[in-house]
Amino acid sequence: MSAESGAHLRLALENTSDIITVFDRDGNIIYQSPAIGRILGANPRARIGANIFDSALVHPDDRASKRRFIKSLIASRPGQELKGDFRLRHVDGTYRDIEAIGINMLHDPHLQAVVLSSRDVTKRKIALAALSESEARYALTFNNAPIGIAHNDPKDGRFLLVNQYLCYILGYSQKELLRKRLRDVIGADDVAQNLRAVHDMQSGRINGYHHEQRFVRKDGSTVWVNVRMAPQRDASGKVTYFLITVEDISERKLTDVVMRRQQELEAKTAVLAEQREQLLAINKAKDEFVSLASHQLRTPATSVKQYVGLLMQGYIGPVTPEQQQFLAKAFESNERQLKIINQLLYVARLDAGKVRLEPNECDLSKLLADVVEEQRLTLADQGKEIGLHMPTGPITVPADERLLRMAIENLIDNAGKYSPAGKPITVSLRTGKRQVAIAVRDHGVGIPKELQANLFQKFSRVDNPLSIAAGGSGLGLYWAKKVIHLHHGQLVLVSKPSQGSTFTITLPQAEGTAHVA
Ligand code: ADP
């Protein structure tokens, strides 16, 4: 080596960033470059004469391995390179990661030494550790994100990467899904649109795509999802993969449906409320018409009654027995007509809310005795007996006597109309602690169970062997029940076909009387 090239070599060694250490077969350091000062803060001169096996600067955990490394370096084939890693202590007490490459030059007659180049890789190690940590964190985020994520191959749509949530949404395992293509999980209705979007993204016409649609799960069921796709391109602009996110929106869709149903329902309710208003108005108009018409009918019907009465009594001249018979029939028909007109009027007044109770202390014993007595003759004419059973002494309730009397008369009238001759009728009164019960019992045609519920409706009539002959409007029970309700009482029926019926009125009683027994 010329003096000039020796000087050049020395200059190179002095300035290299690696620590160059030259030592002999026994490990005695012949030369160490000044980089040791930069890397470890040590004085290179102080190290000359020291031994490479001296472990003072080596991290205690790496001492054994470093010794082995140096030993194998000394024992290695001439010219062979060997690599070793260990940590060296800086003068500030911290350690530096060192990557060393040694070459055995002991055979070289000029050098007869081992050359070791030690590089400080601390920063690189830190960077690598940070990189692998951020990769791990990314993988964790990708896998655990609460949204489905996938990478798809732009060539055939195959799933290249899928996260756990996507597998959960679609019901596939990760392995299964990685064998599928995007079109395998798209609902039939959306395949064409999705493929068009993929094509447009590849050609660069659009930069991304999102759509609410259905995906098909492994079990064949569908799930509503919000899909977003974005093409990922390389430097040349070619799509390398599609980044796809999938959000499960089935719950929101369900809420949408429920809310839509609710709105429809509200709209229907509003229509129904309007129709109800209209019906109420029509009903009111009808009630007013019935009331008006009945008023107008009552006057002429009453005149007919008076004129027929005068004829029957012979005021206009003698009447033959045959004429008397015809007049009696006319009188009876007129009576029925008047009764119906009156019932229509009563019901119209009740429905219009015009009936006001005028309650008094009403003695039921007296009232029932009167009513029964009044009906006795009429019923006797029809071949029916009427009996009355009640405790002795007055029994009073707060009631509108006129209306209560009409309701009871109605029941007795019906008992007569709907029982054949020879069957007795019984009226009874029982008292209780808080209420009294008035029962009207007959042994007539009775009423089938299935028809009983409707019996108290307006114009409700039940066909029975006596109903045609009896005639009627179907208003009596409707009116009676309403009047009893106005008294805070009840009107109930117990009946069996061919065995008879019992209609019972219960009324709240004036204080101080006993229980219904
Ligand atoms: P109407 O007797 O004028 O038809 P009601 O309202 O008084 O009207 O009675 C309604 C219907 O109930 C009657 O048509 C009749 O079929 C039935 N009904 C009422 N009372 C009795 C009864 N005591 N026995 C059998 N059926 C009865």
Image (cartoon, grey):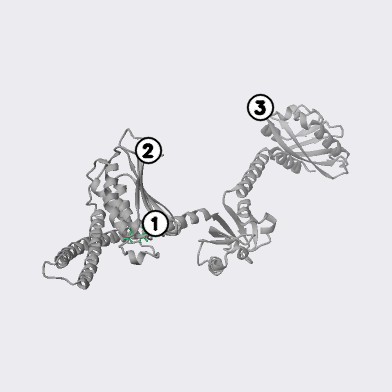
Q: Which quadrant of the view contains residue 54?
A: top right
Which mark lies nearer to you, 3 or 2? 2
Q: Residue at x 33, y 45 (%)?
A: 489
Position of residue 329 in the picture relative to residue 317 (left or right): right
* Residue at which label 2 appears: 432
Q: Specify which label sits upstream in the sequence, 3 or 1.
A: 3
Closest to the observer: 271 or 276?
276
Residue at mark 1 to residue at mark 2: CA–CA distance:
29 Å
- Label for residue 423? 1
Label 1 element class: loop
Q: Which quadrant of the view contains residue 178?
A: bottom right
Residue 11 in sight from this viewpoint? yes
Label 2 element class: loop
Which mark lies nearer to you, 3 or 1? 1
Position of residue 506 in the picture relative to residue 401 (left or right): right
* Residue at which label 3 appears: 92
Q: Position of residue 195 (x, y in %)?
A: 56, 68
Label 3 element class: loop
Check disc 2 and give the amino acid type.
Gly
Badge 1 crowding class, 10 Å Cα cut-off, few under 14, some 14 to 19, many 20 or more, is some
